[in-house]
Image: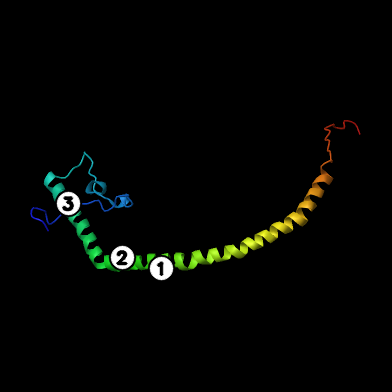
């Protein structure tokens, strides 16, 4: 470390994409005193300090106790998912695309040879059908 550099750095932005904006809770978000009834300033400052330190302390303790284990589990699951996508799912799907391409060509041949003439003939048969609807009502029977 160089001379003159601080040992502790200032707060850095550990959530640059703002994924956890809903977790950022301030004292005034939880304890909201209306203007009609307010506690004394010293009491307000004291409870704010207690709240902020309790939130920070709880977060630090839980991070120390569970953070390492959870980061290991998350890393393990991301590693397994990456392995499955790279070595299992992608080669499997690409291996199936080869025979499915052949099946698709055979199906296209069957459709063009058998179904296209059939539907074209049915279309020509029914193309000259004319339907006239007369809306005349019978008044006397």
Which residue is tagged 3? Answer: 10
Find residue 86 and report its horizontal and vertical position in percent.
Answer: 45, 65
Furthest residue toward right:
141
In screen coordinates, is 31 left or right of 91? left
Which residue is tagged 1? Answer: 80
The answer to whether residue 140 is above or below residue 104 is above
Between marks 2 and 3, how big is the CA–CA gap?
24 Å
SS under mark 3 = loop
Do tag 2 and tag 3 residues touch (Cβ < 8 Å)?
no
* Residue 53 disc label: none
Crowding at dot 2, Cα within 10 Å, few <14 / some 14-19 / many 20+, comes out as few
Name the residue: 80% across, 46% down: 123
Which of disc 2 and disc 1 is earlier in sequence?
A: 2
Between marks 1 and 2, how big is the CA–CA gap?
14 Å
Which residue is tagged 2? Answer: 71
Find residue 76 and report its horizontal and vertical position in percent.
Answer: 36, 68
Count the numbered circles shown: 3
Find residue 30 and report its horizontal and vertical position in percent.
Answer: 26, 49
Crowding at dot 3, Cα within 10 Å, few <14 / some 14-19 / many 20+, comes out as few
SS under mark 2 = helix
In screen coordinates, is 9 left or right of 107? left
Between marks 3 and 1, how big is the CA–CA gap?
36 Å
In screen coordinates, is 36 left or right of 72? left
Find residue 32 and report its horizontal and vertical position in percent.
Answer: 24, 45
Of 109 and 76, which appears nearest the observer?
109
Do tag 3 and tag 1 residues touch (Cβ < 8 Å)?
no
Which of disc 1 and disc 3 is earlier in sequence?
A: 3
Of marks 1 and 2, the one in the foreground:
1
Quadrant position of residue 129: top right
Crowding at dot 1, Cα within 10 Å, few <14 / some 14-19 / many 20+, comes out as few
């Amino acid at each position: 470390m160089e001379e003159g550099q601080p040992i502790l750095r200032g707060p850095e932005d550990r959530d640059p994409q703002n994924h956890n904006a809903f977790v950022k809770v301030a004292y005034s978000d939880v304890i909201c005193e209306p203007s009609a009834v307010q506690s004394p300033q010293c009491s307000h400052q004291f409870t704010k300090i207690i709240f902020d330190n309790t939130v920070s302390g709880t977060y630090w303790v839980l991070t120390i106790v569970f953070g390492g284990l959870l980061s290991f589990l998350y890393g393990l699951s991301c590693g397994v998912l990456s392995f499955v996508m790279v070595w299992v799912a992608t080669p499997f799907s690409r291996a199936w695309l080869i025979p499915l391409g052949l099946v698709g060509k055979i199906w296209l041949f069957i459709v063009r040879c058998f179904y296209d003439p059939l539907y074209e003939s049915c279309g020509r048969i029914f193309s000259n059908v004319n339907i006239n609807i007369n809306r005349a009502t019978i008044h006397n029977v």
